[in-house]
Structure formats: structure tokens, C-alpha cells
Amino acid sequence: MDDHIVAIDLKFYDKEKEIDKEIEKLKHEIREKLNDFDKRLKRLLKQELSNMRLHFSFETI
């Protein structure tokens, strides 16, 4: 009986480790995607600000 319980505990421990690895992998992927999104957003904002300045310059002339 005790051997059976130990085997089940080890099985769950292995599954838990597998899940932890998958969670870490997903966290890494999410961080990468957020960084990419952040970079694109900053680039677009800079571009938009540049366009606004250019538009403002033409209006003031």
C-alpha cells in the first residue's frame, strides 16, 4: 500500500515539475511578446509625434 502511495506521489511530483517548466516557458514567451509590443508601440508613438510636429510646422507657416 505504501509503495503505491509513493509511486503516485512521484508521478504527481514529475507532473508538477513538467507543469512548472511549461509555466516558465510561457512566462518567457509572454515577456518576449510584451517587449516586442512595447518596442512597436514606442516606435509608432515616436512616428505619430513626428507627424504631429511636421503637421504643426506647416500650419504655423
Image: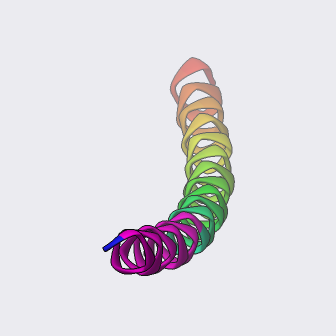
Q: Nearer the viewer, residue 2 or 51?
A: 2
Q: Main secondary structure of the magenta part?
A: helix
**Quadrant of image for the N terminus:** bottom left
Q: Nearer the viewer, residue 3 or 48?
A: 3
Asked if 9 appears above or below 55 in the picture, the reply is below
**Quadrant of image for the C terminus:** top right
Asked if 51 appears above or below 23 in the picture, the reply is above
Q: Residue sitting at 58 percent across and 41 percent down? A: 45
Q: Quadrant of residue 33?
A: bottom right
Residue 52 lies, in percent from the top left, at 54, 33
Residue 17 lies, in percent from the top left, at 58, 70
**In the displayed structure image, the side of residue 43 where residue 18 appears, left or right:** left
Asked if 42 appears above or below 16 in the picture, the reply is above
Q: Residue sitting at 69 percent across and 55 percent down? A: 39
Q: Tag count in the figure? A: 0
What kind of colouring is applied to the model shown? rainbow
Q: Nearer the viewer, residue 29 or 55?
A: 29
Q: Decide whether residue 7 is among the magenta residues.
A: yes
Q: Residue sitting at 44 percent across and 78 percent down? A: 3
Q: Decide whether residue 9 is among the magenta residues.
A: yes
Asked if 50 appears above or below 61 in the picture, the reply is below
Q: Residue sitting at 51 percent across and 75 percent down? A: 10
Q: Quadrant of residue 8?
A: bottom left
Q: Quadrant of residue 40?
A: bottom right
Boundaries of the magenta span: 2-20
Q: Residue furthest front?
A: 1
Q: Nearer the viewer, residue 43 or 23?
A: 23
